[in-house]
Amino acid sequence: MGRFTKWLGAGLGWSFGGPIGAVLGYLIANAIEGFGKKDFQEFQRQAQGHSYNTHSGDFEVSLLLLSSFVIKADGKIDPRELDFVRSYFVKMYGKDRANHAFRLFKGIIKSEAISPRQICLQIQHQMQHAARLQLMHYLFALAKADEIVAPEELDMLHKIAGYLNINPRDFESIKAMFYRDSQSAYKILEIEKTATDQEVKAAYRKMVKKHHPDKLRHLGEEHLKGAQDKFLKIQEAYEQVKKERNL
């Protein structure tokens, strides 16, 4: 196998089952030059024994698939959003691996036969809650890449969150990290502005436990970078509330 097949095969586990496996098999065999059925079968062989463990490759492919749903939600493909995906992958994985991922993404973005619900249900079944929250944080950042979040994009984000079994409070918390207003800090901490000082402190401790970057350590060091960005927003929200209340 070439460098691309080794890169993808080494990191994938449960992605080769269910709807995601079907999508990958079709796209890789038909959309990527020089990649054939034997290569895909080799990927599947390497993935055996990892069905119930999320690996870096699984998370990476999930990012690509979910990105395509958000980008196409408003009926157009904005170059700024494509640039965001490429830049994010370069920051996370390095230029070489990002280029390989973007080759696969070009096939994904052109496909019209991928079901958001089926893809998300597989992710929800196999991926830990902390990793799914990180996916949503990334998707909100993607939607904001062209500065305007169209109603269709926000609707798609709602659908994806529902399919991923992310509750409304977690959804609104992540959303508040990108939509700033006088209530944002409280929304991020998942509390009302009428909360007592003790409730504020308890909420912060709960959010730290839920979103701590160490919860994504099993995916590899590269994924801690994105988790730290989200974690910083929680800390900033807590500091803002403390300042308002002179705590």
Image (cartoon, rainbow, N blue to C red):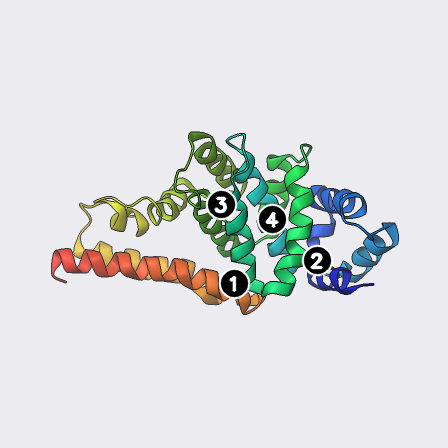
Which residue is drawn at the image coordinates 11% and 61% (left, top)? 246
Q: Nearer the viewer, mark 2 or mark 4?
A: 4
Q: Quadrant of residue 199?
A: bottom left
Q: Earlier in the sequence, mark 1 or mark 2?
A: 2
Residue 36 - label:
none
Q: CA distance from mark 3 to mark 1?
A: 16 Å
Q: How many marks?
A: 4
Circle 3 SS class: helix
Q: Earlier in the sequence, mark 3 or mark 1?
A: 3
Instruction: Identify which amino acid the numbered label 4 is placed on.
Output: Leu
Distance CA(mark 2)–CA(mark 4): 16 Å
Mark linked to residue 13 = 2
Image quarter where the N terminus lies is: bottom right
Q: Nearer the viewer, mark 1 or mark 2?
A: 1
* For residue 215, side relative to residue 184 (left or right): right
SS under mark 2:
loop
Residue 222 percent across, percent down from the top left = 54, 66
The first of marks 1 and 4 along the sequence is: 4
Q: Residue furthest left?
A: 246
**Badge 1 is on which residue?**
91
Residue at (24% x, 44% y) in the render: 181
Q: Which residue is mark 3?
A: 80
